[in-house]
Image (cartoon, rainbow, N blue to C red):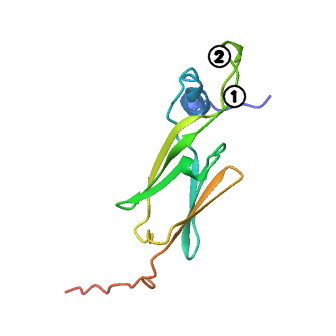
């Protein structure tokens, strides 16, 4: 029989994982009886040599007027509405987990993001936003003069 060392923080890690799961998936379903509720879509942001790419999961958008992308003071904001048209009565609904209603998400862009030529595409439920980097050239190291 192998001995397992006692970890006094094991219960805290389990509690953190349960809270993350609750707020990531179960929390919105508590408000499923509401017609319009605000959601926070999940997003990733990565960079290449020439641009930043923000990918945001937005399944269910039907037309481009349902989503708005704004940049103000180097903050990118994605907002809009996901419509669900179903003729199902509330008393016939057993479980509702799919998101519908209004959503909004804002992130701060890096300082070298050029917000003039932003391009966005929507395909297969994913909104991709391409933000070019400024072409300020390579970083220059400043020599410090010690006395």
- Which picture quadrant has residue 29? top right
For numbered disc 1, what is the local secondary structure? loop
x and y percentages locating residue 132 in the rendered image: 51, 72
Of tags 1 and 2, which is closer to the observer? 1
x and y percentages locating residue 13 in the rendered image: 57, 33
- The residue at the far top in this view is 91
Crowdedness near tag 1: few (<14), some (14–19) or many (≥20) residues, C-alpha within 10 Å: few
- Which picture quadrant has residue 52? bottom right
What label does residue 86 carry, if any?
A: 1
Crowdedness near tag 2: few (<14), some (14–19) or many (≥20) residues, C-alpha within 10 Å: few
In the depicted structure, whether residue 57 falls above or below residue 141: above
Evaluate whether residue 79 shows in this view. Answer: yes
From mark 1 to mark 2, how far is it between C-alphas? 11 Å
In the depicted structure, whether residue 105 falls above or below residue 10: below
Kindly check if marks 1 and 2 are in contact, taking CB atoms under 8 A apart as contact.
no
In the depicted structure, whether residue 62 falls above or below residue 83: below
146 horizontally vs 117: left or right: left
What label does residue 41 carry, if any?
A: none
Q: Quadrant of the C terminus?
A: bottom left
For numbered disc 2, what is the local secondary structure? helix
Looking at the rendered structure, the number of numbered marks drawn on it comes to 2
x and y percentages locating residue 119 in the rendered image: 55, 66
What label does residue 90 carry, if any?
A: 2
Q: Residue at x 49, y 55 (%)?
A: 69
- The residue at the far right in this view is 1
Q: Quadrant of the N terminus?
A: top right
x and y percentages locating residue 62 in the rendered image: 65, 46
Between 139 and 47, the one lying in front of the other is 47
Evaluate whether residue 11 shows in this view. Answer: no
Q: Residue at x 54, y 41 (%)?
A: 81
Q: Residue at x 64, y 34 (%)?
A: 84
């Amino acid at each position: 029989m192998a001995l397992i060392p006692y970890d006094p923080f094991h219960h805290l890690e389990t509690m953190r994982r349960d809270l993350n799961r609750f707020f990531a998936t179960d929390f919105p379903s508590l408000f499923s009886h509401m017609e319009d509720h605000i959601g926070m879509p999940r997003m990733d942001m990565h960079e290449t040599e020439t641009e930043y790419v923000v990918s945001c999961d937005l399944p269910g958008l039907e037309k481009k007027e349902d989503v708005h992308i704004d940049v103000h003071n180097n903050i990118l904001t994605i907002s809009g509405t996901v419509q669900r048209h179903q003729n199902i009565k509330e008393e016939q609904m057993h479980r509702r987990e799919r998101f519908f209603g209004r959503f909004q998400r804002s992130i701060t862009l890096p300082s070298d993001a050029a917000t003039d030529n932003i391009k966005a595409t929507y395909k297969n439920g994913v909104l991709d936003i391409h933000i070019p980097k400024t072409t300020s050239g390579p970083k220059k190291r400043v020599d410090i003069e010690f006395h």
